[in-house]
Image (cartoon, grey):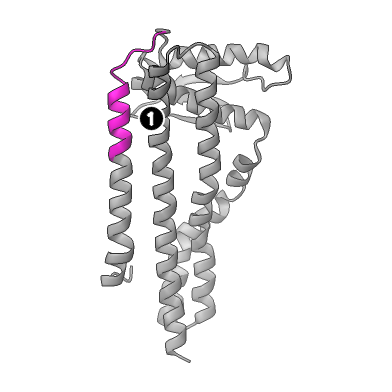
């Protein structure tokens, strides 16, 4: 849409570079630490189950109780996720069945989301609440911008910008959710003895920090696109004045 040299230089190339570097770093960190066995010998699925069982004792002291959370498999590679709708932790084969540092880090991160859900973590609730706006914006925003520019209806184009901005807002709202889940994961694996050495903890940190960079890159990409469309609509409006 509206491809030109400005879009190429200011949006497409920076976005490709950022996402490419983030993706490479994630794969590099995960590949490295997937070769290092956790001293506890637990697979990702076993680590998740141990943390869920441990939550029963923690809940007695006022913590979140995760005993209603299930752990199931899902196809693909690094497709791991927590679904708050069915209270299920889905782990990919390489995470569920591997006793590596990388596997327990990923499993613990997703369990961090389960803890957020159980505690009613506000940033997570906010992110979930804006999903309808984001879905509308991703489908209609660019259409309204295009229609507004073609029909020379500035108001329509700016409304399209508003809806399109939902994507950037969602990317921004995702950062505290993901960072907090990673912080929880780092603490959980250490407290439960799943990770037992400084070297293993360094591996957990590297894997989760690498994953966090993908969300930063996603936010910057969304902001680049939003600023480009604002510049385009604003320039079109000024040219008609």
Residue at position x 44%, y 15% from top? 45
Q: Is residue 89 visible?
A: no
Image coordinates for residue 158, horizontal then vertical, percent = 52, 73
Task: State the count of labels.
Answer: 1
Label 1 crowd bin: few (<14), some (14–19), many (20+), radius 10 Å:
many
Which residue sits furthest front? 198
Residue at position x 61%, y 32% from top? 116
Residue 16 sits inside the magenta stretch: no
* Residue 42, above or below 126: above
Image coordinates for residue 236, horizontal then vertical, percent = 42, 82
Residue under label 1? 206
Instruction: Locate residue 55 relative to residue 33 in the image: left or right.
Output: right
Q: Is residue 193 visible?
A: yes
Q: Nearer the viewer, residue 33 or 162?
A: 33
Residue at position x 36%, y 30% from top? 78
Q: Nearer the viewer, residue 21 or 161?
A: 21
The answer to which quarter of the image holds residue 39 is top left
* Residue 104, above or below 16: above
Q: Main secondary structure of the magenta part?
A: helix
Q: Nearer the viewer, residue 212 or 119?
A: 212
Tell me the element at label 1.
helix
Magenta range is 24-39
The answer to which quarter of the image holds residue 211 is top left
Image coordinates for residue 12, horizontal then vertical, percent = 30, 60
Q: Nearer the viewer, residue 3 or 74?
A: 3
Image coordinates for residue 1, horizontal then vertical, percent = 33, 67
* Residue 15, above or below 56: below
Residue at position x 42%, y 13% from top? 197
The answer to which quarter of the image holds residue 44 is top left
């Amino acid at each position: 849409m509206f491809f030109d040299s400005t879009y190429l230089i200011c949006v497409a190339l920076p976005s490709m570079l950022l996402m490419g570097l983030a993706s490479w770093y994630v794969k590099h960190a995960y590949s490295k630490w997937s070769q290092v066995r956790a001293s506890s010998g637990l697979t990702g699925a076993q680590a998740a189950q141990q943390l869920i069982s441990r939550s029963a004792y923690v809940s007695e002291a006022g913590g979140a109780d995760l005993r209603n959370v299930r752990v199931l498999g899902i196809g693909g590679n690094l497709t791991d996720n927590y679904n708050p709708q069915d209270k299920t932790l889905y782990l990919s084969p390489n995470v569920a069945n591997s006793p590596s540092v990388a596997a327990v880090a990923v499993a613990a991160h997703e369990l961090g989301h389960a803890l957020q859900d159980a505690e009613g973590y506000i940033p997570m609730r906010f992110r979930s609440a804006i999903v309808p706006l984001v879905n509308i914006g991703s489908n209609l925003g660019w259409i309204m911008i295009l229609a507004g520019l073609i029909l020379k209806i500035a108001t329509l184009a700016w409304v399209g910008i508003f809806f399109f901005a939902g994507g950037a807002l969602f990317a921004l709202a995702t950062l505290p959710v993901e960072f907090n889940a990673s912080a929880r994961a780092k603490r959980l694996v250490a407290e439960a003895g799943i990770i037992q050495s400084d070297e293993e903890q360094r591996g957990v940190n590297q894997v989760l920090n690498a994953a966090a960079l993908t969300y930063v890159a996603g936010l910057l990409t969304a902001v680049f696109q939003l600023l480009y469309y604002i510049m385009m609509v604003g320039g079109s409006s000024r040219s008609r004045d």
